[in-house]
Image (cartoon, rainbow, N blue to C red):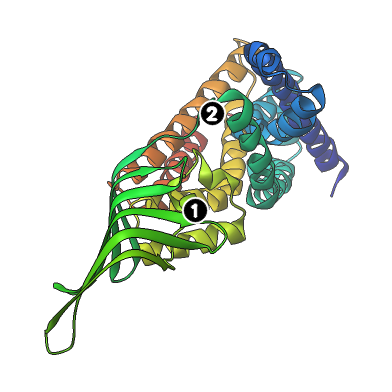
Amino acid sequence: MKLLDKYILKNFLKTFFFTVLIFVIVVSVIDFTENHDDFIEEKVPYSEIFGNYYLNFFPYIANMLSPIMVFIATVVVTAQMAARTEIIAMFNSGMSFMRVLVPYIIGATLIGGMTFYLIGWVIPDANKVRLDFEDKYLRGNKYVDAFDVHVKIAPEQYIYMQSYNPVNESGYDFTLETVKGNRLYSKLKSKKATFNQELQAWHLESYSTRWFDNQGKEFFKHGGQLDTIIPITPADFNMRPQLYSTLTMGELDEYITKLKDRGSEELPVFVTEKTERYTYPFAIVILTIIGVIVSARKSRQGTGFQIAFGFALAIIYILFVILSRTISQFGSVGPVTAAWTPNIIFTGIGYIMYKTLPR
């Protein structure tokens, strides 16, 4: 790397990390102010507040803000260089615009690689601790009865419960059906099904079984009690908010496989999450390049206008990401398409700006 590359890279990374640190501190102070009364009411030890909650809150917020922060850092550094006519001097020395981009792309790649590691393994583990803390002290009662529960537990097996109570881990009017094609092979019914943690099995009360042999002959069986192993546990019913954010890449792959086997409607949410984790580093690079294009010329309005413009573009990008995720969850667009769409759109915006904006 040349001296000029090191100069730009150093300023870019230093500005990025400083900006992230400042915003994380501000957000954390606001969060502490909002939750302080709850902490006092629940008598939460400060060791838990800062050791379990905020220590794991920091990386979560830093990751959430990183696309905006990398854009702002790029605009700040480049706009200041442009204001000091350093960019003009580079161009006059024979450097092309693509050559000027090199240290920025190196910096964005380093940030993107670090971000991918964090969102793939570090932040999910941190979110487990943070969300446990929120469940215990901030959210109050997280147990909510479910009604008309339909779950596919295997390619040909379906469970139905008229209602499910997560407190006593019991389902009422329980039905387990095995269906092959359009043909019913067996049906197990029970007035109440309770999960036995010790046996890791479901305890059925007042049950009846109906099944057919290969010749279509029908059989019945009734009983008072029955313990049976079914490939589903209360954890599958008590899906916490943002469960996808607590899964590492390996855990996410396993969970997606399980949802595929069950034919779950929640599958697009987790596939979108996995795809977005791969697209995140590319977003960092794309936003960095757009930031350089926006701020590489000396503006009469000053650097403040360029920073504000860059901030607005970053906000629009975040809105695109949120919109794409929402559309994917409703099944209107495939998860992979939804995850890549914001990056594709902003790549096009960057190309148009590169061709049209004077530098």
Q: Is residue 237 rendered to the left or right of residue 354? A: left
The circle on residue 3 is: none
Residue type at tag 2: Ala
Q: Position of residue 15 (x, y in %)?
A: 77, 28
Q: Is residue 144 above or below residue 161?
A: above
Q: Which residue occupies the extreme front position in the image?
A: 224
Q: Is residue 45 above or below residue 41?
A: below
- Mark 1: secondary structure: helix
Q: Residue at x 59, y 13 (%)?
A: 305
Q: Where is residue 91 in the image (x, y as percent from the top left)?
A: 70, 35
Q: Residue at x 41, y 34 (%)?
A: 144
If you read the primary sequence from the N terminus, does the residue marked by circle 2 or circle 1 appear first? 1
Residue type at tag 1: Thr
Q: How crowded is mark 2: few (under 14 residues within 10 Å), some or many (20 or more)?
A: many
Q: Position of residue 337 (x, y in %)?
A: 38, 52
Q: Mark 2 points at which residue?
A: 314
Q: Where is residue 101 in the image (x, y as percent from the top left)?
A: 67, 42
Q: Residue at x 45, y 47 (%)?
A: 169
Q: Residue at x 45, y 52 (%)?
A: 236
| In the foreground, 347 or 56 | 56
Q: How crowded is mark 1: few (under 14 residues within 10 Å), some or many (20 or more)?
A: some
| In the foreground, 287 or 300 | 287
Can residue 278 be seen here? The reply is: yes
Q: Distance between the residues labelled 2 and 1?
A: 20 Å
Q: Mark 1 points at which residue?
A: 275
Can residue 71 be seen here? The reply is: no
